[in-house]
Image (spheres, grey):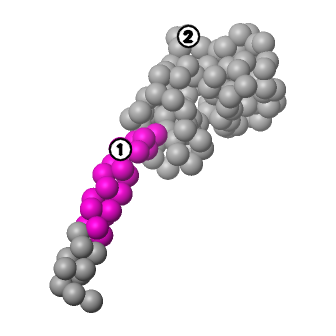
Amino acid sequence: MGLRNKLAIGLVTGILTLVLTSAASFAAPAQFPNFFYGDATLDGAPAPVGSVVTAVVDHNTPTERHYVLNVSPVGKFGGPRYNQRKLKVGGDLQGNIAHGSEILFFVTSGPLAHGTTLTPAGTGVFRASSWPQIIRLSLVQN
């Protein structure tokens, strides 16, 4: 094999490496999860242990996603310390949700069925962020 062929193969290999590396850098950025914890009230009283806090993304659509965390201890879901569980919404391992997607919260005595017509708990609408957030909520479900 001549010097000319070796140079041509080296040049093609270098160009392919550059193109493939550039294409990977334009891929969608990783979606970080949002974390929630706080107080949960159900029917006017602190939610009992075993109640479920559900975060719903894209509510009442074919792409609706549920993220759940059980209430424990009474009236609490998750906690602020690093070693306490939190309600994880989104992120690569749980299926990406689009930046800015609406997140609705529900407190129920059991699992929330897809397409439920309950009024969302709490006040305000949360939007999924492309950066990790840890947010404390007080959820009231009547």
Say which quadrant the N terminus sits in: bottom left
> Quick check: 60 left or right of 125?
right
Mark 2 vs mark 1, foreground winner is: 1
Q: Is residue 142 visible?
A: yes
Kindly identify which residue carries mark 1.
Answer: 26
Kindly identify which residue carries mark 2.
Answer: 123
What amino acid type should be assigned to the residue bearing mark 2? Thr
Q: Secondary structure at mark 2?
A: loop
Q: Foreground: 51 or 105?
A: 105
Residue 91 is one of the magenta-drawn residues: no
The numbered mark at residue 39 is: none
Dominant secondary structure, magenta: helix
What amino acid type should be assigned to the residue bearing mark 1? Phe
Q: Residue at x 52, y 11 (%)?
A: 124
Report x, y in % for residue 3: 18, 84
Q: Residue at x 76, y 13 (%)?
A: 118
> Residue 49 appears in which quarter of the rendering?
top right
Report x, y in % for residue 95: 59, 41
Q: Which residues are magenta?
A: 12-31
Q: Is residue 79 visible?
A: no
> Quick check: 107 left or right of 97?
right
Q: Foreground: 105 or 103?
A: 103
Q: Secondary structure at mark 1?
A: loop
Q: Residue at x 62, y 30 (%)?
A: 76
Instruction: Count how many numbered circles sit on residues in the image.
Output: 2
Q: Earlier in the sequence, mark 2 or mark 1?
A: 1
